[in-house]
Amino acid sequence: MSAATGDERVPEDVFLALADPIRRQILATLVREGGATPTSLAAALPVTRQAVAKHLAVLDRAGLVLGRRTGREVRYEAQLRPLRQATRWLDGLAAQWERRLGAIKGLAEQEDRPGA
């Protein structure tokens, strides 16, 4: 479960949701098509409608999809804000590693200089 409050999601929720290739396919389809029902999603996937519904529930908990009832069916749309938040978190982590690697490189170059 998410330790986030309000609209803020922790990156782990997004990463866990995207860890499964079927969920990534579902999200990609929703982005590409602008929305779909579990029935229409299942028609293009090697899983049942019930399995798609379970995958959509995981994506929903991560905030990556939003379901809206239309008559008897629920139509899902992709919500990319949590993905952008996770991307910013990854960018920050990458920047930290770049700084650390830069410092190590600087130390190694200092030791390679004559008279060091």
Image (cartoon, grey):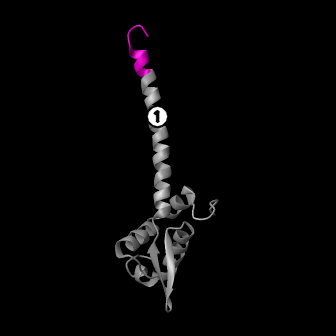
At x 50% / y 62%, what residue is drawn? 82
Is residue 74 or residue 5 the one in the foreground? 5
- Percent across and percent down for residue 7 are 57, 64
Q: In the rendering, at what x and y percent does residue 5 appear?
A: 63, 62
Neighbour class for label 1 at 10 Å: few (<14), some, many (≥20)? few
Q: Residue furthest left?
A: 32
| Amino acid at circle 1 | Arg
Residue 6 x %, y %: 61, 65
| Quadrant holding the C terminus | top left
Question: In front here: 11 or 51?
Answer: 11
Exactly how many numbered labels are in the figure? 1
Please tell me whether mark 1 sits on a helix, a strand or a loop: helix
Magenta stretch containing residue 114, yes or no? yes
Residue 57, horizontal then vertical, whole percent = 55, 74
Q: Which residue is farthest front?
A: 6
Which segment did they paint magenta?
108-116
Residue found at x 49% / y 45%: 92
Residue topped by disc 1 = 99
As drawn, 66 above or below 62:
below
Residue 48 visible in the snapshot: no
Q: As displayed, is residue 98 above or below residue 81?
A: above
Relative to 86, does residue 55 appear above or below in the rendering?
A: below
**59 lies above or below 13:** below
